[in-house]
Image (cartoon, helix red, strand yellow):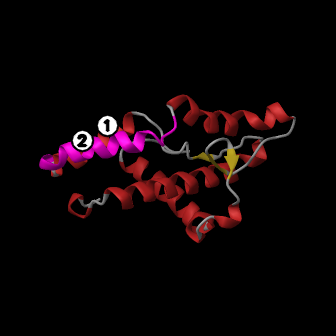
């Protein structure tokens, strides 16, 4: 967690990997109880995340702000409206019951409401040791901050 080593792209990618690993481990722990957990990537969405990433970039390169504005306007034409970005989330939560089966367990959903084949995921995303390690790290971190974990 060294701010000097911060890389927006690397940390964003790591957060997506952590989301996938954590949801797979959660699913593995709750599957026997009839509970499912899935990871969802809503895609590039015209939402608040853009405002924060633009602010971070602009603070480092204020003279390039007009360029950032032009690039942002061009990119937004290819981004999903927030309502469409939410469809993958809704699908992951509701598709199983709507289609009359138990639903997906430990899957990864991408725009718009599609299951991404596990066989095409990077090896890190399918690594059970990483899943369990992230879970243990999270429990230890929460315990160190005074949160009880059962």
**Quadrant in the picture for the C terminus:** top right
| Point 51% across, 32% down: residue | 81
Residue identifier under label 1:
51
Is the residue under label 1 in contact with that under label 2 (CB below 8 Å)?
yes
Judging depth in this view, the residue of 120 and 14 nearest the camera is: 120
Q: Residue furthest top?
A: 83
Query: Is 36 displayed left or right of 50 in the figure?
Result: right
* SS for dot 2: helix
| Residue 9 sits inside the magenta stretch | no
Residue drawn at 49 percent across, 54 percent down: 16
Residue in front for this viewpoint, 143 or 72? 72
Q: In x, y percent, where is residue 45?
A: 48, 39
Q: Residue at 42%, 47% (x, y): give it.
A: 142
Residue 55 circle label: 2
In this rendering, the answer to whether 1 lies above or below 144 is below
Q: Main secondary structure of the magenta part?
A: helix
Say few, some or many: other residues with alpha carbon within 10 Å of mark 1 (under 14 / 14 to 19 / 20 or more). Answer: few
Instruction: Give, as a single range, the part of the protein colored magenta.
Output: 62-80
Q: CA distance from mark 2 to mark 1?
A: 6 Å
- The 10 Å Cα crowd at callout 2, few under 14, some 14 to 19, many 20 or more, is some
Left-right relation of 27 to 79 = right
Quadrant in the rendering for residue 5? bottom left
- Nearer-the-camera pick, 37 or 74: 74
* Percent x, y of residue 120: 66, 66
């Amino acid at each position: 967690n060294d701010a000097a080593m911060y890389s927006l792209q690397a940390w964003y990618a790591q957060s997506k990997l952590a989301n996938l690993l954590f949801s797979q481990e959660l699913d593995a722990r709750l599957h026997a109880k009839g509970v499912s957990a899935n990871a969802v990537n809503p895609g590039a969405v015209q939402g608040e995340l853009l405002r924060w990433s633009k602010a971070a970039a602009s603070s480092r390169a204020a003279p390039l702000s007009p360029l950032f504005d032009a690039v942002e306007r061009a990119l937004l034409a290819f981004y999903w409206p927030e309502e469409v970005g939410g469809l993958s989330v809704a699908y992951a939560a509701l598709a199983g019951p709507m289609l009359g089966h138990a639903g997906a367990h430990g899957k990864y959903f991408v725009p718009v409401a599609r299951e991404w084949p596990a066989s095409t995921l990077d090896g890190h995303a399918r690594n059970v040791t990483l899943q369990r390690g992230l879970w243990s790290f999270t429990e230890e971190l929460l315990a160190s901050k005074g949160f009880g974990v059962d």
